[in-house]
Image (spheres, rainbow, N blue to C red):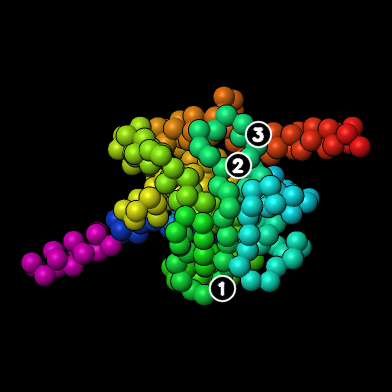
Amino acid sequence: MFTNFLYALVFVLFLYGCATKQVYTGNYNDSAVISNNTGPLKMVKLDVKAANGDCLVREAKPERTLEKHKIEFEGAFDVTDPRQKAVANVISSLDRFQNKKFSMPTATKFKFSHKAEVSRTLGDSLIEVNPSPASARAMRKPEFGGTDNQALIAHMLAYQVAGQRTVYKDFRKKAALQEKCLVSRYAISKRALSDFAEAFAAYLTNPDLLNISDCEKTFAYMKDFFGEESNEITCASRQKRFNSQAGSADQSSGTAK
């Protein structure tokens, strides 16, 4: 009789587990929450919009942006290389925030590799971009862009930004210690600066990911950090803003000619 009770208990626990476990749909474009309101993205770079820079500037002439900010690349590249365009899109988008409270990354060299190793910053000026062992399989999928992934580039640049003055200390005080922002699982992994880097990458490459109830203070911090005053900050509004700025810039350059 006791054995029958144990079998019944195990069966009930099994049914409970099936009803409550996290079920990932495989569609990484479902904002921060995947299903059943139970779990965040593994990493911001696995959001399709963020990965492909759908909310960013689309640079027609990436060489101008790269030259302006003294961005270099290790190895043989030409201006049509998608990795150069991806970096230029991220840098140009950052440059559009006129009231930001951080300095633009400059004199930075990028080294791209397809090795399954973690991406890393080497010193103050070299960024090595790799797919990483934890996400190498996903990063091989065309929708995530591999090392052309613009959310990954933004994430790596965030480490440089976090090293400026008291940026990370301020972020910790005003946001990270105030809430557990579940923008991604990597953000809460306790790896050094991962919470800041993921929040920074999400806010820039797809702010919809960060604009969730778990991240209210983090979103407010990034909004102030980027110097945005608009009450509507979404991927769609970001696209509209960048497109209008690009149009104004084209008209100005046309007038100058």
Instruction: Name the residue type under label 3.
Output: Ser
Q: CA distance from mark 3 to mark 2?
A: 15 Å
According to the picture, the residue beneath numbered tag 1 turns out to be 114
Quadrant showing the C terminus: top right
**Place of residue 47 in the rendered image (x, y in percent of width and height, measured from the top left):** 55, 53
Q: In this rendering, which labeled residue sits more in front, label 1 or label 3?
A: 1
- Residue at 41 percent across and 39 percent down: it is 165
Tell me which corner region of the image, top left, top right, bottom left or bottom right, holds residue 231. Answer: top right
Q: Nearer the viewer, residue 106 or 8?
A: 106
Look at discs 3 and 2 and give the one toward the viewer: 2
Which residue in the structure is indicated by mark 2?
Answer: 94
Q: Which residue is pictured at 58% across the width and 62% down the height?
A: 110
Task: Point out residue 206 in the picture as x, y percentages from the top left corner.
Answer: 57, 44
Q: Which residue is mark 3?
A: 237
Quarter of the image containing the N terminus? Answer: bottom left
Residue sitting at 34 percent across and 39 percent down? 169
